[in-house]
Amino acid sequence: MIGRLSGTLIAKQPPLLLLDVHGVGYEIEAPMSTFFKLPAIGEAVVLQTHLVVREDAHLLFGFATQTEKNLFREIIKISGIGPKLALAILSGIGVDDFWAAVRAAETGRLVKLPGIGKKTAERIVIELRDKAGAGGPGDLGMLNASGVTISASPIAEARAALESLGYKLPEAQKLTDAVHKEGMSTDQIIREALKRAIR
């Protein structure tokens, strides 16, 4: 799996962009939210990527942030939604707004997105509702142009860590909210949350 690419932007023509990585040109499809953040042609860029392997093609999708990539991966797990439609969704609504719509079960807001009918919107809400807390799963910040991680808040990182340990998102939220105090580090929140979990 190609999970991240760092190189020089050679061309951009939505939804396609071309990235030169040490002499190899990668064709990447990206949502408009990523295109808006791209530098000028000839400049360096770092993209989070997801590779889709089909019988007739290998398709590479790129994202400006890890949160966009995480949402893309959640959306394509839903029956009837492929990568192209997932890109259209990300192009039409921001990550935070998407999760807010899912939390509030605002299917009318989702139906306004290209390619999303009422039944698909209802399926999105039903299948992703449990993951819609705290801006969605795996909200671990983003990479800047030099590939350095810009951290999310300690509480968001702690929730993601608890999820990776097998806790469901609502449970991870409940535990971290119960122990979080201003100024606590991610490690402190995780430690206190685990103590509370085994009481």
Image (spheres, rainbow, N blue to C red):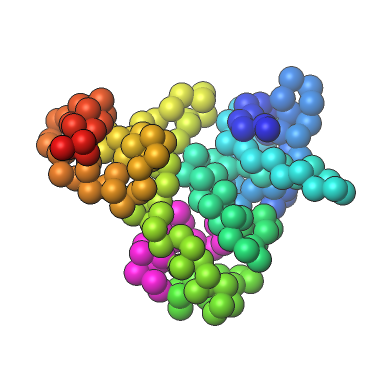
Left or right of residue 49, residue 109 in this image: left
Quadrant of res 83 = bottom right
Q: Where residue 33 sits in the image (x, y, percent)? A: 54, 51
Q: Which quadrant, please, contains the C terminus?
A: top left
Residue at 41 percent across and 54 percent down: it is: 131
Left or right of residue 11, residue 173 in this image: left
**81 over 163 or under it: above or below:** below
Quadrant of res 91 = bottom right
Q: Is residue 65 visible?
A: yes
Q: Which residues are magenta?
A: 88-106
Give the main secondary structure, helix, strand or loop, of the magenta stretch: helix
**142 over 98 or under it: above or below:** above
**154 over 120 or under it: above or below:** above
Residue at 87 percent across and 49 percent down: it is: 56
Residue at 57 percent across and 72 percent down: it is: 120
Q: Which quadrant, please, contains the N terminus?
A: top right
Q: Where residue 46 sits in the image (x, y, percent)? A: 58, 31
- 99 within the magenta span: yes
Left or right of residue 138, residue 193 in this image: left
